[in-house]
Image (tube, rainbow, N blue to C red):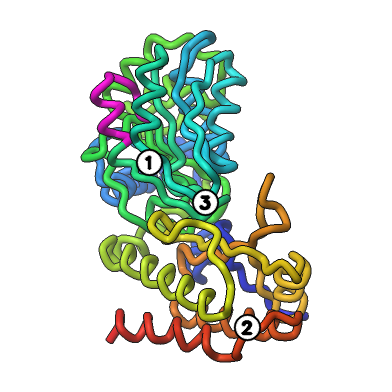
Amino acid sequence: MVKQKLMIPGPVSLTPEVLQEMARPLIGHRTPDFEEILIKCWDNMKEIMRTKNDIILITGSGTAGMDAAIASTIEEGDECVCIMGGKFGERMADIVRSYGGIPREVKVDWGKGVDPDDVERVVEESDAKAITLTHNETSTGVIHDAKAIGEIAQKHGLLFIMDGITSVGGDLVEVDRWGVDICIVGSQKCLAAPPGLAMLSVSEDAWGVISNNNTRNFYLNLASYKKSLKKNTTPFTPSVSLVYGLSKALDAVLKEGMENRIQRHRTLAKATREAVKAMNLELFADEKVASNTVTSIRIPEKLTDEDVRGRMKREFGILLAGGQAQVKGKIFRIGHMGNVDYLDLLTVLSALEIVLKKSGHGLVLGEGVSAAQEIISNEIG
C-alpha cells in the first residue's frame, strides 16, 4: 500500500501532536476546564486574524460558517453584492439566494482578480446591505484584494462579509484594518486543524445588524452564539475532540509566528509556480493575483486528468486536487498550506516530473525541482 500524501487545499495533514490531542478523554462541554480551552482558542484566533472582534466557534464545515454569516444578516428581499470568479464566490451568492436575498453579482473571469472599480459600479447600481468576497479562491488559485473591497464597503456603509477559509493562518489577513465585519475561517485549511469546525470574527456593526435581522435559521443563528459568549460557552454541544485538536494546532501556528508562517506559504507558492513553468506547464491563475496557499495549473492538451492526478495518486500516493465546475478536467491544483514544508513540496514536484514524463509530456527531468530549489535556497539561506 502506497502511503498517501495530501497536497490538496484542505483537509491537510495533521501533526502527531494534534492527532494525539484529539485522543484525550472527553470532558464536559459545560465545565470550567472546557471553558478554559474555548477562551484560549478564541484569544489565539484573535491574534491570528489581527482583530479585537468577538470570535464565534461552530461545529460544522467552513460552509456552515458561510451559511451562518448570511442567514444572520440577510433577510428576504435584501440585496447583497456578491463577488464571483470561482466556485466559492458563487457559493456565497447561492446562500444569499437560498434565504430570499437578491445577489448583485460582480462578474470575474476565473483565474483573474476582482477589479475594485467593477465592485464600486455594482454597489452604486444596487441597494445593497452587504458585500461578500471569497478572499482566497481555491477553485481558481486566486487571491483577491480584500483591503480594497473593505474600503468600498466602508465608503458605502455596507457590511463586509469575507470568506477567509483558505487564507487565515497562511497569508496576510488583517480583519480590523481591512474593515471586515464577518470573517469566516475553516479549521482544516491553513490552520492545520481537523475538519469540522468553523470560526467567525464578528464586528460590533455586524452584531447591530444581526440583532435586528429576522433570521430563518436555528443552529446557525449567530445571535444565539452571541448570548453564549457571555457565559464563555457555545449554545449547542461542540465537538470536544475537534476543539482539543484546534487548540493544539493554534498553539503551533503562534509558535511558528504569523510572519514566519506567511513567508513560508509565500515561498512554497513561488517555488511551485517557478517549478511548474520549468516543467513546460502553464499556470491557470494570473501570477499577479496567484494564491499563496494553492497553485492552479492547466493540464496539457495531450494529457488528461487521469494522466496527471490519477497517476500521482496511484503510483506515488500523492493526492492533488482537480478542477471544479467549468474547469473540471482542465486544471489540477497543488495545495501547499498548513503543515506543508519545503521537503514535502520538493518530493511532490519530483514525482510530478516523473508522471508527466511517463505520460508523454515534454520536459527535462530535474528542471522543475531545480527551479523550486533555487527559490527555496534563496529564501532560507
Q: Give residue 111's mark.
A: 3
Residue in the foreground of this view, choosing between 55 and 318:
318
Nearer mark to the viewer, of 3 and 2: 3
Q: Give residue 48's mark.
A: none
Residue pictured at 60% horizontal, 90% vertical: 364
Q: Give residue 353's mark.
A: 2
Q: Amino acid at mark 2?
A: Glu
Q: CA distance from mark 1 to mark 3?
A: 43 Å
Q: Can see residue 37?
A: yes
Graded by Cα atoms within 10 Å as few (under 14), some (14 to 19) or many (20 or more), the crowding at tag 3 reads many
Residue pictured at 67% horizontal, 86% vertical: 354
Q: Is residue 91 magenta-colored?
A: no
> Compared to 322, does 185 lie above or below?
above
Q: Compare marks 3 and 2 and give the one earlier in the sequence.
A: 3
Lateral position of residue 366 relative to residue 153, left or right: right
Disc 1 target residue: 35
Residue pictured at 40% horizontal, 12% vertical: 127
Q: Compare marks 1 and 2 and give the one earlier in the sequence.
A: 1
Q: CA distance from mark 3 to mark 2?
A: 24 Å
> Compared to 37, does 70 lie above or below?
above
Position of the N terminus by quadrant: bottom right
Q: Give x and y (percent) for residue 335.
A: 54, 64
Residue in the foreground of this view, choosing between 215 and 299:
299
Q: Amino acid at mark 3?
A: Gly
- Element class at badge 1: helix
- Element class at badge 2: helix
Q: Compare marks 1 and 3 and give the one earlier in the sequence.
A: 1
For the record, the magenta segment spans 149-160
Q: CA distance from mark 1 to mark 2?
A: 49 Å
Majority secondary structure of magenta residues? helix
Q: Indicate the quadrant where residue 86 lies.
A: top right
